[in-house]
């Protein structure tokens, strides 16, 4: 099965209300512009949760000449492990809230959640985005309750598949987790 293209995604959203398909993602047809906007909004909203494909752990960012840490432009969310809560994300910079400064003064390893373009998204994620975008499009422009219920059922199925793929790709193992190791070590007395 080939990956769902952005154009195919837009046309699937348009088909929910019976709109005609378009031949380009840059179409000026008003409903296609709306469908694409919704598609991109939903993609960003769901990506913000963080998945195996858009998270990077322990990413080293070098300070700039002012001692500041500038985050990559596609950063949605950033966490600094082992900083005792002093460093927080403000826009695309790190801020030291205890010292009230952007001058961090050293290189920092961060955990990032990034927004990826459509072409970099896995198929399972593309499908869930199209389902949610179809729901929003129907709700805002058509409003069919029956169609909403069908889309909700589709979302439920696709969410389970995405969650399964996320778990599989993270290679989660309860016995190998830090928490399990801590519990096992603590109970060895």
Image: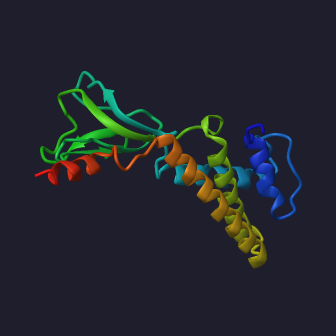
Q: Position of residue 125 (x, y in %)?
A: 62, 48
Residue farthest along the top direction in this orientation: 65
Question: Does 3 sit left or right of 163 as displayed?
Answer: right
The quarter of the picture where residue 76 lies is top left
Q: Position of residue 19 (x, y in %)?
A: 86, 59
Residue farthest along the bottom direction in this orientation: 145
Q: Position of residue 189 (x, y in %)?
A: 10, 52
Task: Look at the picture and state if 76 lies above or below 106.
Answer: below
> What scheme was used to colour the molecule?
rainbow
Which quadrant of the rendered structure holds the N terminus? Answer: top right
Question: Does 81 sit left or right of 136 as displayed?
Answer: left
Instruction: Name the residue rendered at 62%, 54% in the picture.
Output: 161
Question: Does 123 sit left or right of 27 as displayed?
Answer: left
User: Does the image show residue 31?
Assistant: no
Instruction: Name the residue rendered at 86%, 41% in the picture.
Output: 23
The quarter of the picture where residue 90 lies is top left
Question: Does 22 sit left or right of 78 as displayed?
Answer: right
């Amino acid at each position: 099965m080939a990956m769902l293209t952005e154009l195919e995604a837009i046309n699937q959203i348009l088909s929910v209300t019976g709109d005609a398909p378009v031949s380009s993602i840059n179409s000026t047809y008003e409903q296609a512009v709306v469908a694409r906007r919704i598609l991109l909004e939903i993609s960003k909203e769901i990506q913000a949760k963080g998945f195996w494909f858009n998270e990077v752990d322990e990413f080293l960012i070098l300070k700039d000449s002012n001692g500041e840490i500038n985050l990559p432009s596609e950063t949605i969310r950033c966490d600094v492990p082992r900083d005792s809560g002093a460093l927080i994300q403000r826009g695309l910079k790190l801020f030291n809230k205890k010292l009230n400064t952007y001058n961090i003064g050293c290189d920092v390893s961060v955990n990032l959640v990034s927004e990826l373009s459509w072409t970099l998204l896995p198929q399972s994620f593309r499908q869930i985005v199209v389902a949610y975008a179809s729901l929003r499009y129907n709700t805002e422009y058509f409003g069919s309750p029956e169609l909403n219920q069908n889309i909700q059922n589709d979302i439920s199925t696709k969410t389970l598949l995405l969650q399964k793929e996320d778990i599989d790709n993270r290679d989660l193992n309860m016995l190998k987790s830090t928490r399990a190791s801590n519990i096992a070590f603590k109970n060895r007395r």
